[in-house]
Amino acid sequence: MKTYEIACIPGDGIGKEIVPAGQTVLAALAASRNTFKFEFENFGWGGDWYRRHGEMMPANGLDALRNKDAILFGSAGDPDILDHITLWGLRLKICQGFDQYANVRPTRILPGIDAPLKRCTPEDLNWVIVRENSEGEYAGVGGRVHQGHPLEVATDLSVMTRAGVERIMRYAFKLAQSRPRKLLTVVTKSNAQRHAMVMWDEIAAQISKEFPDVKWDKELVDAATARMVNRPATLDTLVATNLHADILSDLAAALAGSLGIAPTGNIDPERRYPSMFEPIHGSAFDIMGKGLANPVGTFWSCVMLLEHLGEEAAAAQLMAVIEQVTADPALHTRDLGGSATTAEVTQAVCARIAA
Ligand code: ATP
Ligand code: MG
């Protein structure tokens, strides 16, 4: 029987609750299908590790992950540690170390979810946002001079390379082509950002020629936010820069009902390294340790993990079970207006997998 080795990194906050829930569901799924199994290895990296060792993960930590089939990630963030240290020291270290340059974020209104767009049906809102995940506004290039002085200057340069933009654009066109509507919206801000974003537009036009069957259009990022609210059905696949897609995908998750539902894959499309799957939310310290965390975003991330492994049937089974569970208001966590706990939702998913 095929065995998949999965690295699990719960990280901080509710990551410690939702990643074990994800493992439980994946194990239940493997047991029910009996065609493959999982071997999980847990890594206790994050804020607690930082307090003991002065770093979020060991310097050679990537070596322990390199040969895994995939990574299931929770969140990185600690109230006592500066955000840019937790982020760069763990999550971005893995994303960059393994060149997971495509960050893929599906958004749908799942059955039974009371989404804020009242005129919008689940058929109207079915998006996938492709986020450039290796450069752009989060390239880490910049600096501060005269720190603390009244004349201090600080910069964060947005760095885009032709190779980096071409590969994410090609990935997005390919993904759009694989979806029924074959529709791609390229998000830009080339009216105000006159260098990198103009190159971004030119490369979109160039790559589009490789995909004559994909209908595509261009939208300024500010207009894109309004369009997501006013005309959601006109969107399907979106591709945007690191910063723009970061913002658009939080909006997308909120429009679909809750930050707690939305999944992500940090993908290395060339499969040189393991890809990493995680819910889009952060460590949510306000609700940690109370059993209030919605595990659906993690379960949906597990669906993406299974698709990445080529386990399409198992992925479809888990997605169908997730939809049965969201359809039942008695199984909604507090973020969805219900009172179910993380454990109750996890048990309900496992019971339906076994049924
Ligand atoms: P980070 O800095 O780690 O990104 P954050 O402060 O941005 O964290 P998030 O964790 O992204 O906060 O979430 C924002 C709010 O949404 C949280 O305060 C929490 O109440 C709610 N939330 C996030 N994830 C979930 C979830 N899985 N279940 C229920 N509520 C959630
Ligand atoms: Mg956040």
Image: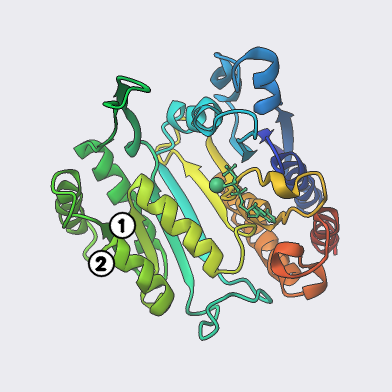
Residue lying farthest bottom? 119
Q: The residue under label 1 is which amino acid type?
A: Phe
In front here: 137 or 165?
137
Q: The residue under label 2 is which amino acid type?
A: Trp
Q: Earlier in the sequence, mark 1 or mark 2?
A: 1
Query: Distance of mark 1 from mark 2, alpha carbons?
Result: 9 Å
* Corner quadrant of residue 338: bottom right
Residue 354 tag number: none
- Secondary structure beneath disc 2? strand
The image shows residue 345, relative to residue 272, as above or below, that is below
Residue 173 tag number: 1
Residue 295 on image: x %, y % = 72, 54
* Corner quadrant of residue 63: top right
In front here: 209 or 112?
112
In the picture provided, is 86 more to the left or to the right than 246?
Answer: right
The image shows residue 34, relative to residue 144, as above or below, that is below
Residue 65 on image: x %, y % = 59, 25
For the point 69% across and 76% down, the residue is 112
Residue 12 on image: x %, y % = 68, 35
- Secondary structure beneath disc 1? helix
For the point 37% across and 66% down, the residue is 225
In the picture provided, is 73 more to the left or to the right than 158?
Answer: right
Question: Is residue 345 among what the camera can see?
Answer: yes
Q: What is the quadrant of the N terminus in the image?
A: top right
In front here: 86 or 162?
86
Residue 216 tag number: 2
* Neighbourhood count class around disc 1 (C-alpha, 10 Å): few under 14, some 14–19, many 20 upward: many
Pointers 1 and 2 in contact (C-beta within 8 Å): yes
Counting the numbered discs, the total is: 2
* Neighbourhood count class around disc 2 (C-alpha, 10 Å): few under 14, some 14–19, many 20 upward: some
